[in-house]
Amino acid sequence: MADPKTFGIAGLLGWPVAHSRSPVIHNHWLAHYGIPGRYVLFGVPPEKLEAAVRGIAVLGMRGCNVTTPHKQAIFPLLDRVDDLARRIGAVNTVVVEKDGTLTGFNNDGNGFIQSLRDADPKWRPDSGPILLLGAGGAARAVAASLAAQGAKEIRIANRTLDKAKEIAGAVGPVVHVLPWEQREEALDGIAVLANATSLGSAGKPPLEIALDRLPKNAVVGDLIYVPPETPLLETARKRGNITVNGLGLLLNQARPAFNAWFGVMPNITPELKQAIAATF
Ligand code: NAP
C-alpha cells in the first residue's frame, strides 16, 4: 500500500459515472481534514474492468468505490470479499491492504441503517417489522445488513416475486416474501417502510401505495435522492412520519470507506450536506 503521507488517490469505477456525488463527498472531507489526496471518477467499460482493477494497487491508489455494472463482476478480481458483501452478492468498496492485496466490502445497507438511526435515534433494527419494497441489488444490501444487525422480521414485497424469494434464500428466515399487490396490508404494525424500488425517482412513475395502515411512529426511508423528496416521502412527512431520503445512505456508506482509505472517520456536517445540495 502507498505511504499514508503521500498524495492519496481513491475513486469510483463504473460505467457511466458522471452522475455520481461521491467526488463531492470525499473531496470535501479531504479538504476539511487537510489530507493531501483526490477522489476521481473512472469510467470503465465492462471489458476493461479487469485491467482497471489490476491497476488499483499498481498505481498506488488507496482503493475505490464500485458501481453499476461492476458490483458483481469485480468479485473474482479481488483477493478477498468480506462476509456481508458475499451475502449481499455485490461489492461497493475496495480497500488496498498494506501488502497490496484487494479486499471488497459492501457498506450500502449499513449506510441506509445508519441514516434511519440518524433520523430517529430511538429506532433499532429489532424495533419492529420492516417493510422493504423492491428486490433489486439495493434491497438485497439493505435486507442482508438489517438481518446482520438483528432485525427480527423483514417483509419484502416485489413485483417479481422470484427476486424477493432469492433474497429470502440468501438472507434467511427473518425475510418474509409478499406479492407486490399485498404491500398495503403489509404496512400493519411496521416500524420502518423502506422504498428500494426505482419508483419515484426522476423520470420514473411514482410509487403507488396508500399509507392509511402505516403506523404514525414508523420511519419512512427512500433510497432515492433525486428528487430529494419523492412523492412517498412527501405523503409520509405530511401525515407525521419521520422521513429520510437516499442521501443518508450515500453519506453513511462513504464514511467507513474514507476511514479505510485515508485513516480518518469523517463527520457528516451541514456544510457537506449543503455542498451536495448545490449539485442539484
Ligand atoms: P434494480 O436492481 O434495478 O431494482 C429495481 C427495483 O425496482 C426492483 O425491485 C424492481 O422490481 C422495482 N421496480 C422497477 N420498476 C417497477 C415498477 N414499474 N413497478 C414495481 N416495481 C418496479 O435497482 P437497485 O440498484 O436495487 O436500485 C433501486 C433504487 O435505489 C434506485 O432508485 C437507485 O437509484 C436507488 N439506490 C440509491 C442508492 C443511494 O446511494 N442512495 C444506492 C443504491 C441504489 P422487479 O424486480 O419486479 O423488476
Image (cartoon, rainbow, N blue to C red):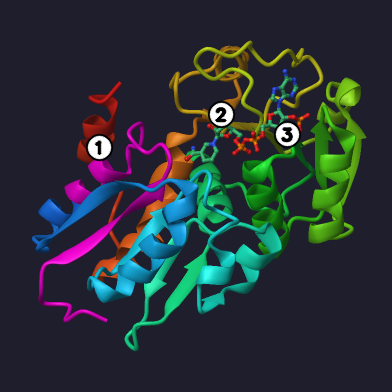
The residue that mark 3 highlights is 134
Instruction: Tell me where residue 202 appears, x and y as whole percent.
Output: 49, 15
* Image-based side of 173 in relation to 132, left or right: right
Quadrant housing the N terminus: bottom left
Which badge, 1 or 3, comes first in the chain's sequence? 3
Q: Which circle marks residue 270 in the picture?
A: 1
Whether residue 140 is situated above or below residue 54 in the rendered picture: above
Residue stretch rendered in magenta on the structure: 1-28
Quadrant housing the C terminus: top left
The residue that mark 2 highlights is 242
* Residue drawn at x 54%, y 20% as measured from the top left: 201
Q: Which circle marks residue 83 in the picture?
A: none
| Residue 45 visible, this angle | yes
The secondary element bearing badge 3 is classed as: loop
* Residue drawn at x 37%, y 39% as measured from the top left: 17
Q: State the CA–CA distance, disc 1 to disc 3.
A: 31 Å
